[in-house]
Amino acid sequence: MSTPVIVYSSTGCPRCHQVKEQLQEWGITYEERNITDNLTYFEELQQRKIFGTPATFINNKPILGFQPEKLMKALGIEVGTIKPSEASSEESEQALAKDEIFRTMDASMTNDIYDFVVIGAGPAGASAALYAARGRLRTLVLDKAPTSGTLAITHKIANYPGVRKEVTGLELLLEMQQQAKDFGATFVRTQVTGIDFSDTELKKVITAEGIVRAKSVFLGVGAKAPSSKISGEEEFTGRGVSYCSTCDAAFFENRLVVVVGENEEAIYEASQLAKFCKEVRLLLPTGHLKGDVTLEELEGKENVHIYKKHRVKEIHGEHAVDRIVIQDEERNEQTWEVDGVFLYLVGMKPGTDFVGNALLRDEEGYITVDDQMKTSIDGVFAGGDARKTIVKQAVISAADGCIAALGAEKHVNKRTQMRPQYS
């Protein structure tokens, strides 16, 4: 590949990691310019009116954020022509040498029978794989996009038990996955397109490469944000629209930004941005905070202003964001001149559509389970964001995976009780 490719990245940026990982899988050689480590690179982006990372330049034309289809088009790659196993660049060879966690599906996997197949490699799936593999179950983990889940794109984790230092969600997740792999679990990148649980003995998991058979299954597919976006959001992503203060706060020093959201992440991000920005306006669309969080700290900051029941309707600008349309509680609209918009909108939907009627689900799509993570089908378990919980936390998802794996070990070995794994 002779096309010049430059990736502007920043330390701790999950989407930067996704871009680099994808280019490596395609066998694309690129130059990385980390703006955290080199002020010159930071200034280069500012001069181009780009206010966020990742920014991938192909033939001097930018692609902002992680957009695989646009990357393929710019690189002249047709869908299906390049697969991870065909990558031949120096970067790919180096990545393989580092013992990558995920591998591609091969024919032997569709011929074998596994004790335990895990769908989803997030904290629930990785924990389930860890306990199952340690319990000597032949374990296979399937995930189509292992670094794009909720935990993987969380920029900061400071409250996971046993991890005293602050880490990115991706760092924590990779540790979980590697630990499960160390115990013998196999991780495969593939898309699950359907399931067949009609056979009481062997469950079938349908993938793009073929059917995988298993004695027990765990669904830890997680949840995803709704697909609807604010008008102008996609157009100005990386040009004033951001989702991560760790990645992009420095671009907005002494500027005016708007933070939209009502969850813990939005409140934290507003607090961090206040250290850089001339003014931070926090918009709470419904006026109610989600989770265990308060506005006390923000209310004490002179450069932070809080607007309850205000929404962003439209985002506008020329080369970058310069104004937004706001709707207040009385549905009156006004235009604000701003330099940036940080979005942390909630509203997650479980990724269980492929399950269909094979398992009992509620009206929102969450899989129905009992206190042992058992579903309506014997030998099939579910947990994490695939089931409805009071709060969404990585530690709860990990606990679900543990319970499910111990239940699967009991099911496969036809035990009357779960066997705890104490050394």
Image: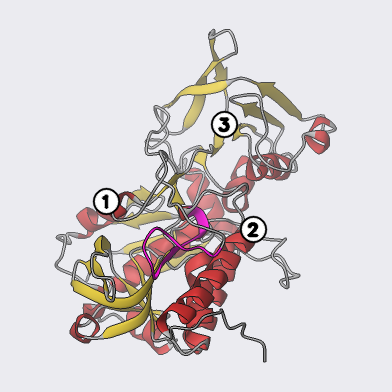
- The residue type indicated by label 1 comes to Lys
- Indicate whether residue 52 is drawn in magenta: no
Residue depicted at x 45% and y 56%: 222
- Screen quadrant of the C terminus: bottom right
Mark 3 vs 1, N-terminal side: 1
| Residue 410 drawn above or below residue 326 | below
Residue 315 visible in this rendered orientation of the protein:
yes
Task: Judge the density around disc 2: few (<14), some (14-19), many (≥20) Cα neighbours within 10 Å.
Answer: some
- The residue type indicated by label 2 comes to Lys
Judged by depth in the image, the label closer to the viewer, 2 or 3, is 2
| Residue situated in front as seen by the camera: 336 or 188 | 188
Identify the residue under disc 3. Answer: 339
Identify the residue under disc 2. Answer: 156
| Residue situated in front as seen by the camera: 88 or 417 | 417
Instruction: Give residue 347's position: percent from left, percent from top.
Output: 50, 38
Mark 2 vs 3, N-terminal side: 2
Q: Which residues are magenta?
A: 372-385
Identify the residue under disc 1. Answer: 70
SS class, disc 1: helix
Disc assigned to residue 281:
none
Most prominent secondary structure in the magenta stretch? loop
SS class, disc 3: loop
Instruction: Give residue 200's position: percent from left, percent from top.
Output: 28, 71
SS class, disc 2: loop
